[in-house]
Structure formats: C-alpha cells, structure tokens
Image (spheres, grey):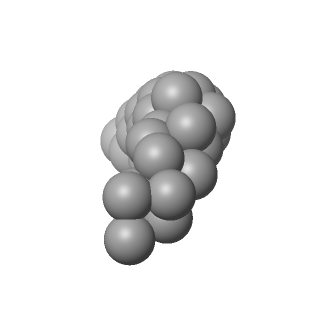
Amino acid sequence: MDKELMEIGDHLPMVEMERAELERWLLLESVKINDANDEDSKMMLEY
C-alpha cells in the first residue's frame, strides 16, 4: 500500500502540470470564442 501511494505521489507533479496546461488551453479557447462572437455581433450591427 505504501509503495502504491508513493508511486501515485511521484506522478502528481506531472498530473498537476498537465491540468495547468489544459486550464490554459481552455482559457485561450474561450477567449477565441468570445472574440469571434464579438466580431459576429459587430457585423450584425452593421446590417
């Protein structure tokens, strides 16, 4: 059991790094979507 917990603990930094990368990617994608929606709104106002 202790060995298994130590192995899990060894993987935590990598998992945390991957989680942070995914959060960053999601944030960037949401900004892109919001920017695209803003552009669509501007175009609709021009008509």
Is 17 left or right of 38, judged from the image as shown? right
Asked whether the viewer can see residue 38, the reply is: yes
Q: Position of residue 38 (x, y in %)?
A: 42, 36
Q: Is 45 above or below relative to 17?
A: below
Q: Residue at x 57, y 51 (%)?
A: 7
Asked whether the viewer can see residue 43, the reply is: no
Q: Residue 19 versus residue 38: which sits nearer the camera?
A: 19
Q: Residue at x 56, y 38 (%)?
A: 10
Q: Residue at x 38, y 58 (%)?
A: 2
Q: Position of residue 21 (x, y in %)?
A: 59, 31
Q: Residue 32 versus residue 5: which sits nearer the camera?
A: 5
Q: Quadrant of the N terminus?
A: bottom left
Is 16 left or right of 45, judged from the image as shown? right
Number of numbered discs visible in the structure rendering:
0
Q: Position of residue 32 (x, y in %)?
A: 57, 35
Q: Residue at x 47, y 47 (%)?
A: 6
Q: Is 33 above or below relative to 13?
A: below
